[in-house]
């Protein structure tokens, strides 16, 4: 079974530029998460989708971050404009449904903002 | 108090030793917990789930202590390949459930 796919794997941008990340969850997984992991910290939830609807975006900095999951499959996370403190690994994870607790992570996108 | 707290370590142990990490949580209503392993520059991978009293998988044992609000991970007969960061996560919420991660505990197994 194919895992969670993410691209790009690495991205370097200058502050105030924009960037977008893509995630394709495990086939059939209804729940999709975007996390931000800053070096030395655990993953922090940014947004959770159930199919193509947003369940929780309370920790998403909405003035600069946006995310969508069209058709309930793959998802994109965008940052515009980027700040230095956005340098982190952005992890996508998926889960089968609300009755199955285990989530599976993609390889992440390592973002460096200079 | 942080929702999920872990000692960042590093825990340096010789090969073959037994090592244990604790993870404290603040939400007394939490029911489900997870241990993830994260290798350097890699994504977290699910190691074990802890739903009630505990779970065991080979050399790994996870325990839940509700009275003191912590979960533990015990690794017996440590291998060099066990060197990694171990993250604990609390699956909790009111209405909408989400995973709250600790900062992780770094383990180094020495030859």
Image (cartoon, coloured by chain):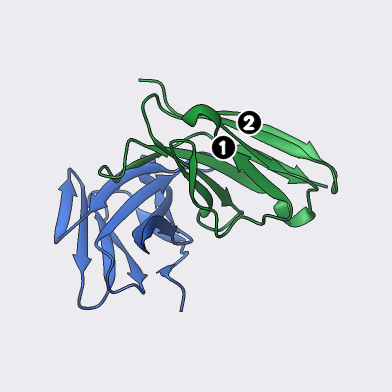
Q: Please state which of residues A102 and A99 is positioned toward the viewer in this rendering.
A: A99
Residue A47 in the figure: left or right of residue A100: right
Which residue shows up at 40% across the image and 21% down it?
Answer: A2
Which residue is the site of mark 2?
A9
Q: Which quadrant holds the N terminus of chain A?
A: top left
Which residue shows up at 42% across the image and 70% down it?
Answer: B3
- Chain letter, colour green: A
Tell me which corner region of the image, top left, top right, bottom left or bottom right, holds residue B90. bottom left
Q: Considering only order in the chain, which callout, 2 or 1, is on the residue closer to the N terminus? A: 2
Horizontal and vertical percent for residue A40? 57, 57
Q: Secondary structure at mark 1?
A: loop
Disc 1 and disc 2 in contact, CB within 8 angstroms: yes
Horizontal and vertical percent for residue B29? 27, 70
Identify the residue at the far left of this view: B53
Horizontal and vertical percent for residue B97? 37, 57
Q: Please state which of residues B29 and B56 is positioned toward the viewer in this rendering.
A: B29
- Chain letter, colour blue: B
Identify the residue at the far top of this view: A1
Q: Which mark is residue A108?
A: 1
Within-10-Å neighbours for mark 2: few <14, some 14–19, many 20+ = some
Give the CA separation, mark 1 to mark 2.
Answer: 6 Å
Which residue shows up at 73% across the image and 35% down it?
Answer: A11
Q: Please state which of residues A82 and A31 is positioned toward the viewer in this rendering.
A: A31
């Amino acid at each position: 079974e194919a895992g969670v796919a993410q691209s790009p794997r690495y991205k370097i941008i200058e502050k105030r530029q924009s960037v977008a990340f893509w995630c394709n969850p495990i086939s059939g997984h209804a729940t999709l998460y975007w996390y931000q992991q800053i070096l030395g910290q655990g993953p922090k939830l940014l947004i959770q989708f159930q199919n193509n609807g947003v369940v929780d975006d309370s920790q998403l900095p909405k003035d600069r971050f946006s995310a969508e999951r069209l058709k309930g499959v793959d998802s994109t996370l965008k940052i515009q404009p980027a700040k230095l403190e956005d340098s982190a690994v952005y992890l996508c994870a998926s889960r089968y449904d609300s009755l199955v607790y285990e989530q599976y992570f993609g390889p992440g996108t390592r973002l460096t903002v200079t | 108090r942080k929702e999920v707290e872990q000692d960042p370590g590093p825990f340096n142990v010789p090969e073959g030793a037994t090592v244990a990490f604790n993870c404290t949580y603040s939400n007394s209503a939490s029911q489900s917990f997870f241990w993830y392993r994260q290798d350097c520059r890699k994504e977290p991978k699910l190691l074990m789930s802890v739903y009630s009293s505990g779970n065991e998988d080979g050399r790994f044992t996870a325990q839940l202590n509700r009275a003191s609000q912590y979960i533990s991970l015990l690794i017996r007969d440590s291998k060099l390949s066990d060197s990694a960061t171990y993250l604990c996560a609390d699956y909790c919420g009111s209405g909408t459930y989400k995973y709250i991660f600790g900062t992780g505990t770094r383990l180094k197994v020495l030859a």
